[in-house]
Image: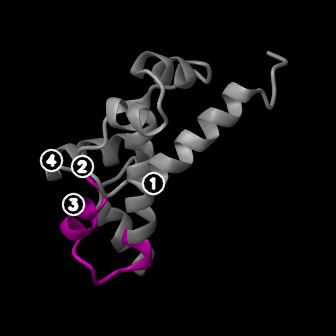
Amino acid sequence: NARKNTVADQHLTMIQAFILRQLAYGDLTPSLTANHFRISTRHLHKLFARDGMTFGRFLLDARLTSCRSRILASPDEPISDIVFSHGFQSLSHFSRAFRQKFGCSANQLRKTYRN
């Protein structure tokens, strides 16, 4: 696919940057994001689909990656505090998603990097 730097790509980049700034908001939804940019929710989903991604997957990956960085950077901060400050509503959902993405638990990751 030879398309690069189209208006749609620029729009998606702006939307992704917005999402990254809003990770703490647990109620960040496609419709709230679309409203912020004055576009339809359908158009928002189409922009993500261009890269083979969904809004939900992008948001989850961004939250997990940000949590991982903070877990490593703040070894004494409780993992639950980090998780909830990144917009997760459930520790069990976070734990399953974290293990699926990184292949270990958040506690295992922290212990590995402490030693």
Label 3 and label 2: CA atoms lie apart by: 8 Å
- Location of mark 3 (residue): 84
Q: Residue at x 37, y 80 (%)?
A: 74
Amino acid under label 4? Ser
Please name the residue that numbered disc 4 is placed on: 92
Which residue is identified by label 1?
A: 65
Magenta stretch bounds: 71-87
Say which residue label 2 marks.
26
The stretch drawn in magenta includes residue 74 = yes
Q: Residues within 10 Å of mark 2 (few under 14, many from 20)?
A: few
Q: Amino acid at mark 1?
A: Thr
Q: Image point 46% across, 57% down: which residue?
A: 21
Identify which amino acid the numbered label 2 is placed on: Gly
Which circle, 4 or 3, is nearer the viewer? 3
To which quarter of the image does residue 113 belong?
bottom left
Which of label 2 and label 4 is nearer to you? Answer: 2
In three-dimensional space, the C-alpha distance between marks 1 and 4, rounded to whole angstroms, equals 17 Å
- Residue 13's place in the image compared with 25, above or below, is above
Q: Judging from the image, what secondary structure is the residue with disc 3 in?
A: helix
> For the residue labelled by badge 4, is the local secondary structure a helix, a strand or a loop?
helix
| Quadrant of the frame with the C terminus | bottom left
From the top left corner, tell me how far across and down residue 3 is, in percent: 81, 20
Nearer-N-terminus badge (1/4): 1
Confirm whether the magenta stretch covers residue 9: no
Work out whether mark 2 precedes mark 1 in sequence or the reverse, and give the earlier one. 2
Label 3 or label 2, whichever lies nearer to me, is 2
Which amino acid does the dot numbered 3 rest on?
Answer: Phe
